[in-house]
Amino acid sequence: MRLPLALALVAGLSTHAWAVESDGTEPDPALTPGAVETQSVDVICHHRTTERRHATTAEKNAVYKAYGLPTHHSAWCAASGCDLDDRVPIECGGSNVAANLWPQKNTGAYNQVDKNRLEGLCKKLVCQGKITPAEGQTWFLGDWKAEYDRRFGAIKGE
């Protein structure tokens, strides 16, 4: 009950222009500031992410609505659809709550497949002890595309 109210409040703080102008590669920081569930290396490296995925269909629909998207096939999602993604990936300690969810496009440069590649590297480096969970989480709380470029090189074209 509180989730739709909270999303409606946050949506009021966000500009509808952002939803119109977005290309679906970055979350609206007002709607999706990000949320961390754990800093535990044990949880990140040895527990399945399905144990931490719990957003309901109603919660997911509320996120699309907050973003001004009637469906996952409207605005920047029209061509190939969008899927809700966690700004801070669950596999890197992110939480599966509305404040961490945003509609991300399925195709083009910097789509969900590209972000998933960076998420996999984050988890790998955390589990190898090369970075802390907090360090990996900052990749996604900042400009994940810049971090992707730094790690893998820039994606050319759409």
Image: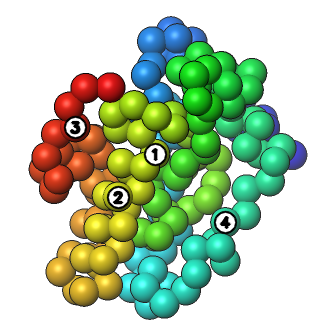
Question: Which residue is disc 4 drawn over?
Answer: 53
Q: Earlier in the sequence, mark 4 or mark 3?
A: 4
Mark closer to the chain start, 3 or 1: 1
Q: Nearer the viewer, residue 35 or 86?
A: 86
Please tell me which of labels 3 and 2 falls first in the chain: 2
Residue under the point 58% across and 30% down: 80
Query: Which residue in the protein does label 2 denote?
Result: 117
The earlier-in-sequence mark between 1 and 4 is 4
Q: Which mark is residue 112?
A: 1
Label 1 packing within 10 angstroms: few (<14), some (14-19), many (20+):
many
Q: CA distance from mark 4 to mark 2?
A: 19 Å
Name the kind of residue labelled 1 in the image. Answer: Gln
Which residue type does callout 3 highlight? Ile
Up the image or down, 101 lies above or below 103; here it is below
Residue 56 x %, y %: 80, 53
Q: Nearer the viewer, residue 154 or 92?
A: 154
Question: Whole-percent x and y of residue 131?
Answer: 21, 75
Q: Which residue is mark 3?
A: 155
**Sequence-first disc among 4 and 2:** 4
